[in-house]
Structure formats: C-alpha cells, structure tokens
Amino acid sequence: MKKYIVTIITLFFIIAISIVGYFIYGNIKESKASSNDMLKEKCISEIEYLGDNIIHVMNELNNISYTNYKIVSEEIEDSSSNEESSSSGSGSNRGNSGEESSARSSNQGNSGQGESGSTITTTNMSNANSILEDDNTDDIDWNSVDMKIQDMYSAWTTIMIDLSSLNVNKDNLLKFNSTLDKISSGIEQKDKENILINSSDLFNLLSGYISEFSGDSNKNSVFNVQCSILYSYSEMERDNWEEASNNVTKAEENFSNILNNQINNIDKIDIINKAYILINELKEDCNSKDRKVFLINYANLMQELQNI
C-alpha cells in the first residue's frame, strides 16, 4: 500500500515538474523571440541610418539637396472663356462698362468661378537654387562629405556586432570597413568618380545584409531598387550611359515586386506610382544622355523611394 502511495506521489511530482518546465521553456522561448525581433528592428534602423548617410555623401558630390526643389503654382487665364466674354461684350452691353469691370474684378477674386475671366491652375517643378550647372569639384563641401564618412566609421563597430548576432555573413561584414577606407581615400584625392562607385558598393553591402535577416520583402525590394539607381548614378558620372541604363532596368525589375505588393502599400500608392514614373523617366534620360535632367529625376526618385 505504502509503495503504491509513493508511486502516485512520484508521478504527481514528475507531472508537476513537467508542467512547470513547459511553461518556463515557453516563456524563455517567447522572450528570445521577442528579443530577436527587437534586435532585427534595431538593425534595420541602423542600416537605414547608414544608407541615408551614403546617399547624402553621393548627393553632396553634385550639390544635390531635396530641398532645392519646389512646386510652383501658376494661374493661366482660360483663353476660350476670354473669347466668349469678348464676344458677349461687343454686343448691346458695351454701354455698361462699369458693370463689366465690376464683374471681371469679382471673377478674378474667385479663380475657377463664373464663365468669364476664369483661370486654370497648373503646377511645375522649379529648381530653386539653380544647381546641377557646374561640375567644379571646388564647389563640393568636402568637409561635410568627410564628416558623414567619419560618422559611419564611428557607428559601424556597434552595428557590426548587432548584425553578427543575427548571423549575417561575417566575410561580407568585413568588406564594409575596407570599402569605407576606399571612399575615405577618394575624399583625400577629391576623386568624385571613385567615391561614387565605392559608395554604391557600400550601399550594395547594406542591401545584402538586410536581405539576410529581414522577412520584409517590400523593404528588401526598396533597398534593391535604391542600390540599382545609385549604381546608375555612378555610371552616369563616368559617361557610361549604357551601363547606367542597364542599372535603371534592374531597378525597374525589382520595383515590380513593390507594384505587385500594392495591397500592403495602399496608403503609399501615390508615392509608388510617382516612383515608377520617375524610373521610366530615368530610362529616357539615359537614352538621351541628358545629364542635368537625369540628376533632377534621380533626386526626385530617391526622395520618393525613401518614403515608401
């Protein structure tokens, strides 16, 4: 009898320990998963920070600033309405010039209202500071470019440790610092072409890192598109228009993933459509070999991509 009771008590303790162990294991596993998700989010933010710095460096080499572009509204008088107004005014109402003057004044104060004196509002992009006219490297703020590179040197050690924790390929991680060294050397020599191509390589490394741990296909696609556009920009600077065009084509292919995922990007549909149009504009710019227009469309495209 006693042996039977001992057996029951032993089984009870085994079951109790198993249940407690199961809950402890579940909590630990959940905690690790939560911690891993937080680390991924942190690494994505760190990579985006580095990516923004790289883009800033490349933009500085042609004095490109997103704030240099503004939308200007213009009011154009509707000529058809004027003709109708002129026709009616040449009839029996000529003697009422005071009334006509009052009516025109009222219409001008309410654009788009009334049949006579109506206006059409149009918008266009204005280059506020008249940049992109000069290739003189003396106009580049080399100190600002160098400061951005130094910022990346300072941040990279911590970021590399975080990426290593997510099992990102260590050989590829080591390439970041060596590529950064090449850019730093290019700054010393004020070699714009060298800096651009190595900066594109640096961004390409970031694109590879994020694809290794991020399950966000949309974010991966955006990085891939940005990378191809940066390579296109670099090749354009070397007057290698054929290769610039090839990279724009790659960007278009990667952008198709974003277009196909519009259900999850419904709140950004306007930005996505603008970006797609600008990619096609860049293809035309490569065909026409129009450097200035290419840079303007490039700047606007990169701004849209950073908002997706």
Image: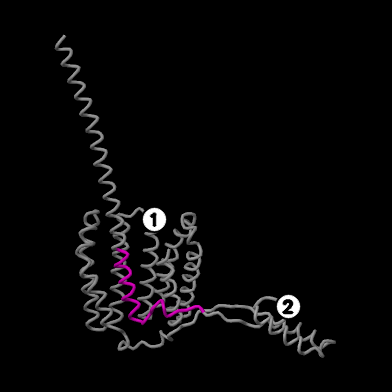
Q: As rendered, which of 273 and 109 lies closer to the eye?
A: 109
- At x 31%, y 85%, the residue is 140
Quarter of the view holding residue 80: bottom right
| Relative to 105, residue 49 above or below | above
- Whether tag 2 and tag 1 are in contact, CB under 8 A, the answer is no
Taking the view exactly as shown, the residue that stands out farthest to the right is 92
- At x 79%, y 86%, the residue is 89
Judged left or right of residue 39, residue 120 is: right
Residue indicated by mark 2: 115
Disc 2/disc 1 C-alpha distance (Å): 52 Å
Whether residue 63 is in magenta: the answer is yes
- Magenta region's main secondary structure? helix
Q: Amino acid at mark 1?
A: Ser
Query: Can residue 80 be seen in this snapshot?
Result: no
Q: Measured from the top left, where is residue 252 in percent x and y?
A: 45, 65
Q: As rendered, which of 101 and 233 lies closer to the eye?
A: 101
Q: Measured from the top left, where is residue 79 in percent x and y?
A: 69, 83
Q: Which residues are magenta?
A: 47-71
At numbered mark 2, what does the secondary structure look like: helix, strand or loop? loop
Circle count:
2
Residue indicated by mark 1: 217
Estimate how packed mark 1 is, as few (under 14), some (14 to 19) or many (20 or more) residues with alpha carbons within 10 Å: few
| Relative to 42, residue 94 above or below | below
Whether residue 130 is in magenta: the answer is no
Quarter of the view holding residue 244: bottom left
At numbered mark 1, what does the secondary structure look like: helix, strand or loop? helix
| Relative to 211, residue 12 above or below | above
